[in-house]
Image (cartoon, rainbow, N blue to C red):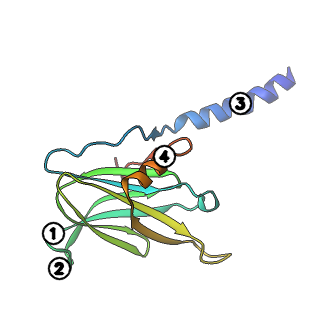
Amino acid sequence: MKNLNAFLFPCLFLFAFCSCASTSKFEKLEEPSSGKSLLYVLRPAQTALSLWSFPVELFRYEGPFQNGKRSSIAKLSMDSADFFSMELRPGFYSLVCRDMDKIFYAKEGGRIFLLIQLFHRGTFSVPGIFIKNAESEESIRFLLEGARMNRTNPIGE
């Protein structure tokens, strides 16, 4: 009986712990609504750097980005193998992750794929971050690899 209890307690604890978190997996590419653009932000799985999670913020520029006036439209935290998608009105936007700032233009009816990639700076240092544009094929490969990427939602949703 003691052996059964010793076995069941950890199993129940693990089941309760794991069942609390539900994640939505990538299913298929979405089509942008009329007059909108669709943004996909991906953080591909990197086993060596999977412990690091960083806050990401999306800004919309009011007019041309040269004037510097922008407002925050989404904040999220991205772990390894996470992705985020959002419909955007045409215009200039900025994706900020730590000290990296990627400015891009959302065109009506288009899809934008941005990859957040981490790289080693040294043995005992926080990894560096690089944000780059990606092609559809490369992005789909990342979205579907392994057990598929997890959808993350903005903070507060």
Q: Earlier in the sequence, mark 2 or mark 4?
A: 2
Q: Residues within 10 Å of mark 4 (few under 14, many from 20)?
A: many
Q: Residue furthest right?
A: 2
Residue holding disc 3:
11
Q: Quadrant of the N terminus?
A: top right
Kind of residue at disc 2: Asn
Residue holding disc 2:
67
Whole-Å distance between the Cαs marked 1 and 4?
A: 32 Å
Kind of residue at disc 4: Met
Residue 6 in the figure: left or right of residue 125: right
Residue holding disc 4:
149
Q: Residues within 10 Å of mark 3 (few under 14, many from 20)?
A: few
- Mark 4 vs mark 3, foreground winner is 4
Q: Nearer the viewer, residue 81 or 76?
A: 81
Residue 67 in the figure: left or right of residue 94: left
- Secondary structure, mark 3, is helix
- Secondary structure, mark 2, is helix
Q: Are the residues at dot 2 and dot 3 in contact (C-beta closer than 8 Å)? A: no
Q: Residues within 10 Å of mark 2 (few under 14, many from 20)?
A: few
Q: Are the residues at dot 2 and dot 1 in contact (C-beta closer than 8 Å)? A: yes
Q: Residue furthest front?
A: 137
User: Which quadrant of the figure has residue 122?
Assistant: bottom right
Q: Earlier in the sequence, mark 2 or mark 1?
A: 1
Q: Earlier in the sequence, mark 2 or mark 3?
A: 3
Kind of residue at disc 1: Glu
Q: Are the residues at dot 4 and dot 3 in contact (C-beta closer than 8 Å)? A: no
Q: Are the residues at dot 2 and dot 4 in contact (C-beta closer than 8 Å)? A: no
Give the percent coordinates (x, y) of residue 156.
Answer: 35, 50
